[in-house]
Image (spheres, grey):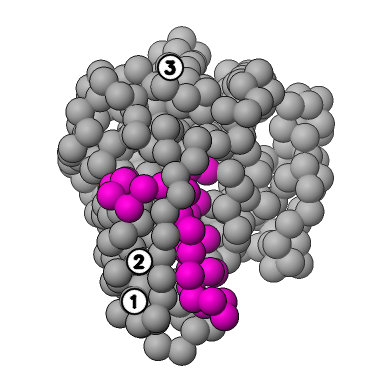
Amino acid sequence: MTQKILIIGSSGQIGTELVLKLRQIYGNDNVIASDIRKGNYEVMESGPFELLDVTNKDDIIDVVKQHNIKQVYLMAAMLSAIAEKSPQRAWALNMNSLFNILDLAKDKVIDKIFWPSSMAVFGPDTPRVNTPQDTIIKPATVYGISKFSGENWCSYYREKYDVDVRSIRYPGIISYKTIPGGGTTDYAVEIFYEAMKKGNSYISFLSEDTTLPMMYMDDAIDATIQLMQSNQIENYIAYNIAAMSFSPKELANAIKKYIPNFKINYKPDSRQNIADTWPESIDDTEANKDWNWKAKIGLDELVKSMLLGLHYNI
């Protein structure tokens, strides 16, 4: 019998597409979407949906028991740029939500957890090129601090209470289906919307040569599900994964192959300071070795997929 799955944060950028993919695999009725607000029409109409505040433990327990949930994907979080404006709110949301779900697994109410970490755990003292799995980790942002703390709490619950919790350090994620919600890599989605408007121009909030690790959403979803389907992972709580790295200038040049008159200008803001603390590229050797992870989509295919997804004829 297929275990019932709860996605918390199903209206977010990753959560939306994760719900739809899991429903394809396990059946619509076996994947319950939830969020504090209503979201994507297809998510709402294709299967069960619950309004849920992840900081309210009693409400979570009610939903888990009502649907006989055994796996939880906790995708709700306050992202990097927004978290810098509201540090205490970000810490409360990102950490209390995690404790609520870890405690359910500790008490054997649920069997398995996915919780996303991020490349934001890395900081200015981390090697920036081919950042290894095991390295200096001293995050410089509220978001990164909460994610690294979360990794350690997940490790504690695994060792102390035998909780099956798994995680990925996501790079920047790019998708046309859901508008991003306050991350430092959001320019790489916004740029496509602006490229197709009448003016064919975009003002980047990162400098032209700010190279960051990026990934197309299809690869991110595949990695998430592949990790959760793998046999018990013992070596790491949160795995590095990688696909490609590029700068705003390199992305703009790739778009110009299809929209020759596209123009980009640069006006770095506070998000530049965050990006400057993150890696340029990531080494995901351990994920490849432990669960055969490998990205499939490169820069040119990403650009074509984004433009086609937004109904641009190429």
Left of 130 or right of it: where is 118?
right
Name the mark nearer the viewer: 3 or 1.
1
Residue 173 visible: no
Residue 175 position (above or below residue 260): above
Residue 126 belongs to the span the image colors magenta = no
Asked whether disc 1 touches disc 2, contact meaning CB atoms under 8 Å apart, the reply is yes
Label 3 to label 1, Cα distance in Å? 43 Å
Residue 20's spot in the image, x, y percent? 59, 62
Q: Which residues are magenta?
A: 183-212
Left of 251 or right of it: where is 155?
right
Foreground: 222 or 210? 210
As shown in the figure, which amino acid type bears the numbered disc 1? Answer: Lys
Residue matched to label 2: 252
- Checking the image for residue 256, the label placed there is 1
Residue in the image at 35% along x and 17% along y = 138
Residue 45's spot in the image, x, y percent? 76, 67
- Checking the image for residue 152, the label placed there is 3
The C terminus appears in which quarter of the rendering?
Answer: bottom left
